[in-house]
Image (cartoon, helix red, strand yellow):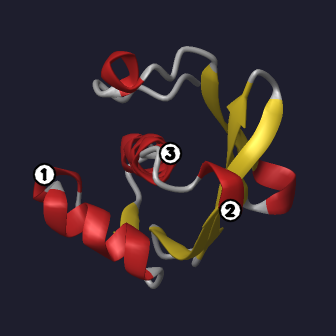
Amino acid sequence: MTDGNTDEGRRGHTNLEVRDNAERSRFELLDSNAVVGHADYHLTGDGTAVMPHTVIDTDRRGEGLGEVLVGAAVRELRGRGLAIDPTCWFVADYLQKYPDLS
């Protein structure tokens, strides 16, 4: 899966990829194949994905990478027909900013 973020080109993020690492229950943001962030999730069994934690490498903060990561993760989970329970403050803020994805 690519990041799917329309802001990618404007921010110069050309080597970004978001992948679902199901074994670790997290989406990972890669820049040139190096993991620079992740968003944890777990499935509750009732059609809900709880997203409790998001991390971007300290030296990469302020580049908009959190939005790239969370945006791709939310779109993927919603595409699977899952509801999102945003217990992470960043995911909750993202869903408030983009209510059509919540």
> Which one is closest to the eye, mark 2 or mark 1?
2
Q: Which mark is residue 100?
A: 1
Going from N to C along the chain, the mark reached first, 2 or 1, is: 2
Instruction: Give the vertical position of 40 relative to 7 (above or below).
Output: below
Task: Quickly name the residue at label 3.
Answer: 65
Q: Are marks 2 and 1 in contact (CB under 8 Å)?
A: no
Instruction: Give x and y (percent) for residue 63.
Output: 47, 44
Instruction: Give the vertical position of 53 relative to 62 (above or below).
Output: below
Measured in 3D between alpha carbons, the distance from the residue under mark 3 to the one under mark 2, in whole angstroms, is 11 Å
Q: Which mark is residue 62?
A: none
Q: Residues within 10 Å of mark 2 (few under 14, many from 20)?
A: few
Image-based side of 70 in relation to 23, left or right: left
Q: Name the image quarter holding the N terminus.
A: top right
Instruction: Give x and y (percent) for residue 5.
Output: 36, 29
Instruction: Give x and y (percent) for residue 61.
Output: 55, 56
| Amino acid beneath label 1 | Asp
Q: Secondary structure at mark 2?
A: helix
